[in-house]
Amino acid sequence: MADPEPDADPLQTGGFLRAVDRVDETIDGWWETLRGHALVDRIYYTASEAADFSLMWHALGVIEAIIEDDPMVAVKVSAALGLESALINGPVKSLFKRNRPIHETDRPHHLRQPRTSSFPSGHASAAMVAAAMLSGHGNTVAWYALAGVVATSRIHVRIHHASDVAGGLIAGAALAALARRCLGR
């Protein structure tokens, strides 16, 4: 009896991972049409860098707390982001040893190159947590739109694969639901 084709059973680990890689390559190919445009590059590189260490989200939590005249807004956003970071950038990334995308040319703008596993995207998970916490005070569409820009910026700058971002968004949504239940909005 001949061995089955390597992708014959997509539920096998090897076949599944090859399928994920093909999807990632396809999405990266589509994304290539956006790379190299000065304005698009500036937007995505700025979003990616501003969200390093969730600094942008913490700052937006403080601004929202000032607007709402309620310091607990900032405390809750930062607490939720702390939980997200501790889990995603600690044990979750340690479970996966995925390499980051190869970037063969110079980037048009400076970016910090993380040394952790590529899966899942911490920028994407933090963006979902922050958007969920901040949207409790209004502007839901704007918060999630900003989260989408931050998450997809990681594909644009080639620091994450599309599946890393999808995994981060899913993990972030789950953590956001937990944070909202435990901390309130």
Image (cartoon, rainbow, N blue to C red):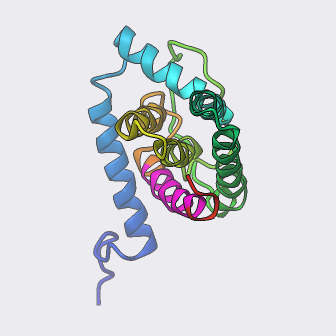
Say which residue appears at 73% left-offset and 54% top-offset. Answer: 86
Residue 145 in the image: state x and y as whole percent. 37, 35
**Dominant secondary structure of the residues highlighted in magenta in the image:** helix
Is residue 162 part of the magenta span, yes or no?
no
Q: Nearer the viewer, residue 81 or 39?
A: 81
Residue at the farthest bottom position: 1
Residue drawn at x 29%, y 73% is 5
Question: Magenta part of the protein: which range?
Answer: 166-180
Above or below for 122 versus 153: below
Residue sitting at x 68%, y 45%: 116
Number of marks drawn:
0
Residue 57, percent from left and from top:
60, 34
Rendering coords of residue 50 (x, y %) = 59, 24
- Residue 11, compared with residue 150, is above or below; it is below
Q: Quadrant of residue 138?
A: top left
Residue 47 versus residue 70 in the image, above or below: above
Residue 61 lies left or right of residue 163; in this view the side is right
**Would you say residue 174 sits in the magenta stretch?**
yes
Quadrant in which the N terminus is drawn:
bottom left
- Which residue, as the protein is rendered here, is positioned at the far top? 38
**153 with respect to 32 (left or right):** right
**What percent of the width, then of the height, locates residue 97?**
63, 56
